Amino acid sequence: EISLSDFRFFNEFLMSNERHISKEIRDEYIDTMSKIYYSYFKSYTSRLMKLQFEEVAAKDDLMGYEDNAKKNILFITHT
């Protein structure tokens, strides 16, 4: 991954001689990196959602399974 700090010398030169061009380059860099990170994040979240809905809980899983047989037990109390 390339960052602006890799080109510090050139950036300093532009800042001292052509400040508006330096700002344009920085703005373009920020815009490009924003698009890249947005793409990564969008892909990551879609994969998470896919994982969330692919797995179905089974009887042997610790969480997420409700055994209906246990609900049908009658309790008799003595009065």
Image (cartoon, grey):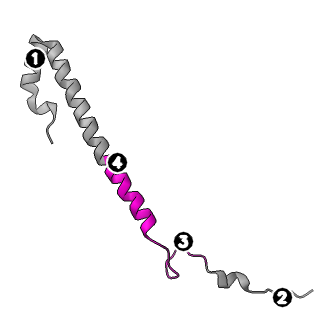
Looking at marks 4 and 1 on the same chain, the residue that comes earlier in the sequence is marked by 1
Indicate the amino acid at tag 3: Gly
Could you tell me residue 47's position as x and y percent? 35, 58
* Residue under label 2: 76
Specify the label residue 64 is tagged with.
3
Looking at marks 2 and 3 on the same chain, the residue that comes earlier in the sequence is marked by 3
Tell me what residue is drawn at x 51 percent, y 76 percent: 62
Frontmost of labels 2 and 3 is 3
- Total number of numbered discs in the rendering: 4
Could you tell me residue 64's position as x and y percent? 54, 71
Q: Circle 1 sits in a helix, a strand or a loop, which is it?
A: helix
Instruction: Tell whether label 1 touches label 4 (CB within 8 Å).
Output: no
Frontmost of labels 2 and 4 is 4
Compared with 55, 27 (above or below) is above
The local crowd at label 4, few if under 14, some if 14 to 19, many if 20 or more residues have their Cα within 10 Å, is few
Indicate the amino acid at tag 4: Lys
Specify the label residue 14 is tagged with.
1
Range of the magenta residues?
Answer: 41-66
* Residue under label 4: 42
Q: Quadrant of residue 1?
A: top left
The answer to whether 21 appears left or right of 39 in the picture is: left
Indicate the amino acid at tag 2: Ile
Residue situated in front as seen by the camera: 16 or 42 = 42
Residue 51 in magenta? yes
Looking at marks 1 and 2 on the same chain, the residue that comes earlier in the sequence is marked by 1
The answer to whether 26 appears left or right of 43 in the picture is: left
